[in-house]
Amino acid sequence: MLRKLRIPLTLTWLTVMFVIPMPLLVLLTNGLSPLYADSALAIQSGMIAYCWMLTAVILSTRPHWLDRLIGLPNIYMIHGILSLGAILLAALHRNALPSSGIIALTGNAAFWIFISMAVWSMVFMAGWLTTRVPLLARVKNAVERVFKHEFSVWLHRLNLVAVTLIFIHVQLIPIVNTIRPFMIAFDAFSALAAVLYIRAKLVQRFGAHRGKVEAFHTIAPGVLEIDIHLPGLKAAWEAGDFAFIRFPGVRGLREYHPFSIVNVPSRNARLRFAIRGDGDFTRALPEKLTEGAAVEVLPPFGRYQRFLDERDAARPMVILAGGIGVTPLLPIALAYERSGRPIRFLYSARNTDQLLYAEELERWATEDRCELNMQAGRFTPEELRAAMMPNAVYLIGGPARMLRSTRRLLVSRGVRADDICYEPFTW
């Protein structure tokens, strides 16, 4: 039987792939003249490509309700696959239906913008790919010395220009713009997408929680802990969540970046982040950040707590953390320390001085039914197998390779994929 997570994810895929394009597809097909029967497939491909790209644009705004349902990593995965699928269908449409004049100009310009942004995004904004292809990772690291992440985020917005060009392109095609029911639906869908996108951006601009940096200090080599005070937040997050934060008054730190919230949800309106200096944004923090600096935080995201809520509260919990991946899992462990639920926490880092919050975890392990195994150096497959518990649920946090290898090991030992939860920061 499908779990609650799989059902929403499956329904989301069906909706974006088929349900959303279907009304336009039916209206377009029914309205086409029989004279264009041989070109119908190419025309339909272009329309579906537009629907998919417009849907991908909406998903890029990170709908908060959808994150709580399927998780932000899945949203980004759907966004990326929809975009690539749209480009493939657009290529079919373009090659099968040659055009001229301004119709060709708008269509070709949009197509090459999409191609360029897809290539750029695959290198700079698709961590799921660069973590698997070392060559791309090296290219990314080299080029990012010149083009910072903020530039990539800004450049990615050229997709909006391409979508606008496609909208104009369709308005100019005689065999399509004369199908009145289709054009009404096409314009309405485009307007709705524009409203949703603008609304999301206004919420991000004016609906973010605003506060200030109360303190920050280094807690391990290359790891900065930041305490932020956000008046009015009032525990609007769940254990294991992450939040997008930015520092609007600091050059180079003005774009939102996601980081896990280290502390347990409370009503004291304070968030704590432990941030490792991996990219240009994070490496600049120790140099550019000052106490009292203004900070903006979007409503937090995350699936760890929802994953646990969807499963029997009596089931044992096994937590597997590597390096900085402990940050979302520490508050989960602390939130359940007196629940009476069996919890086994395995935590490893490259060196002893990179084991974050070791003292807090050691205190946690003194609670009843809380078991801790913390060490420098990765756990062996034999040690991981020995840590497994009957009927347990598994929460994983750490580098992308660790997530994939640990998941494969668990599944190979009979753990259901639906009983494993992890949220890779590969975007």
Image (tube, rainbow, N blue to C red):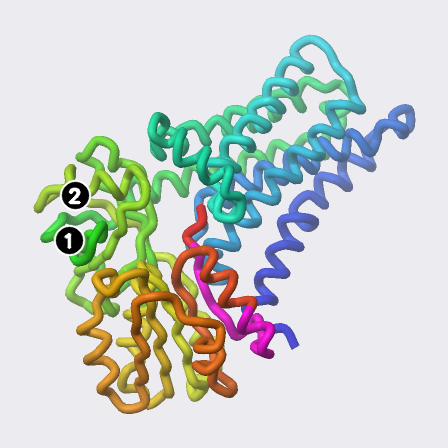
Residue 173 in picture, x, y percent from top left: 72, 19
Answer whether residue 238 is visible to the viewer in this image.
no
Residue 65 in picture, x, y percent from top left: 45, 57
Query: Which element carries disc 2, helix, strand or loop?
Result: helix
Question: Is 113 on the left or on the right of 186, as rendered?
Answer: left
Q: Which kind of residue does numbered mark 1 sit on?
A: Thr
Q: Is residue 418 magenta?
A: yes
Judge whether 352 appears above or below 382 on screen.
Answer: above
Residue beneath disc 1: 218
First in sequence: mark 1 vs mark 2: 1
Are the two marked residues, 1 and 2, in contact with CB atoms closer than 8 angstroms?
yes
Query: Which element carries disc 1, helix, strand or loop?
Result: strand
Q: Which kind of residue does numbered mark 2 sit on?
A: Pro
Question: Is 36 on the left or on the right of 212, as rendered?
Answer: right
The quarter in which the N terminus is drawn is: bottom right
Residue beneath disc 2: 286
Q: Residue at x 63, y 61 (%)?
A: 10
Q: Is residue 232 magenta?
A: no
Label for residue 27?
Answer: none
Question: Is 317 on the left or on the right of 37, as rendered?
Answer: left
Residue 259 in picture, x, y percent from top left: 31, 53
Q: Residue at x 19, y 80 (%)?
A: 363
Magenta residues span 409-424
Q: Image quadrant of residue 321? A: bottom left
Q: Residue at x 46, y 33 (%)?
A: 139
Judge whether 59 appears above or below 339 on screen.
Answer: above
